[in-house]
Image: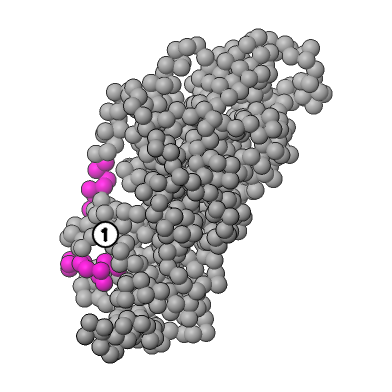
Amino acid sequence: MRIKVNGRTVEIFAGARVKDVLRKYSAEEWARVRRKEKTVTDARGHEVGLEGELSGGEELLTRARGPEEPRP
Amino acid sequence: MTGLADSRPGRVLLGLALLGLFAVPACAGLFSRPAETRVVIFHSNDVHGKIDNFAKVAPILEAERKTGADVFFFSAGDNFTGDPVIDWADPPGGPMFDLLDRLGLDVLSLGNHEFDYQLGPVRKLAARFPTVSANIDPEPGVLPELKPHVVLKTKQGARLVVFGLIQVEPENRVPSTHPDKVKGLRFSDPLSKVPELKKLRAAGDVLIGLTHIGHEQDLRLAEAMPEIDVIIGGHSHTRVDPAVMAGGVLVAMAGADNRFLGRVDLRLENGRVVEKKGRLIDLTQPLEEDPAVKAMIATYYQNPALARVIARAPVEVAGKDALGSLMTDAIRQTLGLDVAFQNNGGIRLDRLPEEITLRDIYTLDPFGNQVVQFVMTAAEIRSLVKSSWDKRKDIDLQVSGLSYLVRADGQGRVLDVKLSNPDGSPLAEDRTFKVGVSSYIAVSYQFDHRDPGRSLQTTPAEALIRFLESGPDLTVYRDVKRAFKEITGPSPRG
């Protein structure tokens, strides 16, 4: 299936989760998310969990996390 | 918890709706509905066995019930899978059943991971709680407790029609769980049910979709079905705070892992929703805890199942070669694959004890990654082995179903990779193999594969537990070695 991350298409296995797509998109970006410097949202800006399940055609964005933002 | 009515819309109600009487405001008082009703729906989704914060949920529900509002508690699916304390309880998921019961769960929509324990526990769940899913069509006798929808009644008689929908993989038309676990159930695309679901509008005062299809699909459902008042969703672990309006439909989801409790407030006047809003309560913050629920949770964490001995090793199973061979044999044999790989970094114990417990397995493989299957040629397998070597200039992958030899020069550059069958003969170049790797390998290693792959919805730990419980001969792992290297020429450091 294909998932867009920050505008770039990532081709990944069916049944992949948010963390899988992020890892494949960029090891550096994944590390920032793991360190909680960045958070992952859907195309509408809603934060999504790293174990969140995806369907082909969905879109993810990464953005800097606010200091007191809770995790989804 | 308030009243549960028959899930099938009454003939009289449906008949009146077909005559269009519900559309006439003058008839709004036909069923003596109260002038104003306040309904509060608390909701959770994708708890995945994370039970700790239920101690904080209980006082929130209790406090709201004391206000006199009609209070309901909904689950939008995936309560199971994610914590061995719950997953390996006896019965599987038992603590979750008891906690949801204690909290007064009113209705549950099945998620794909509800099926991870097979159908038996789903039947128990559906027998204990009103359980809905409109796009599951069970064969006769398979899951008779499941309803497409239920009707809940407020104290003053307002009717909440709650239907369920579950996510379905377009490739194989089953939810994201192992297909063997949903035998006897037929699934249809959630949005294909819209024409049928529209008829439910006439069956009550409030129409609610309690879904497990992901937030994107929830928004599509709202677009296709403006008759819905509220969609409370799950599956994509999306933190929707506040709940959003999609057309006239309020769409909510409460993240995942019990970090948030969703709250939807509805105000009804003369049987119509005149005000609706939703927000999340952050359960990670310090909040009052119910001591009785907290005590229940503490008991569950003493789960004796984790200390249960599932196998005895007559020889020492130690080191990456032995442990990796055992793990990959488990993946290959339990999932019916030709070949399986496990990276050394994913082997988190040096040795297994003589008496192997569930806790040991989750220490050996604590990551919760999925097994992903690729259909690969020998050349593609070779590219995976080469990629693994290039990461560390050394053996990195343990294997089952074949053995391999990496020949590299003194600088660590791969000269060639030789693949052999277990009997030593060369691996066939003119066929494909079903290869299982962890999702970590699937996305972190650069290798050729024309098949995009698919998750088998099983973790390596689950495969290993099943394998060990089948009583394999563990003596074969004493001196096992399947991954070899041969360095030709001097290294840069001499």
Q: Which chain does tag 1 point to?
A: B
Amino acid on which disc 1 is placed: Arg
Q: Give the range drawn in magenta.
A: B303-324
Foreground of the two, B222 or B410:
B410
In reply to whether residue B323 is colored magenta, the answer given is yes
Question: Residue B445: image x %, image y %?
Answer: 42, 68
Q: Mark 1 points at which residue?
A: B348
User: Dot 1: what SS?
Assistant: loop
* Residue B130 visible somewhere in the drawing: no
Residue that lies at the very extreme toward the bottom in this rendered image: B489
Find residue A23 and report its image quarter.
Answer: bottom left
Q: How many marks?
A: 1
Q: Are there few (<14), some (14-19), or many (20+) residues within 10 Å of tag 1?
A: some
Question: Residue A40: image x %, image y %?
Answer: 48, 46
Report whether B197 appears left or right of B141: right
Q: Quadrant of the C terminus of chain B?
A: bottom left
Name the residue: 72% across, 26% down.
B202
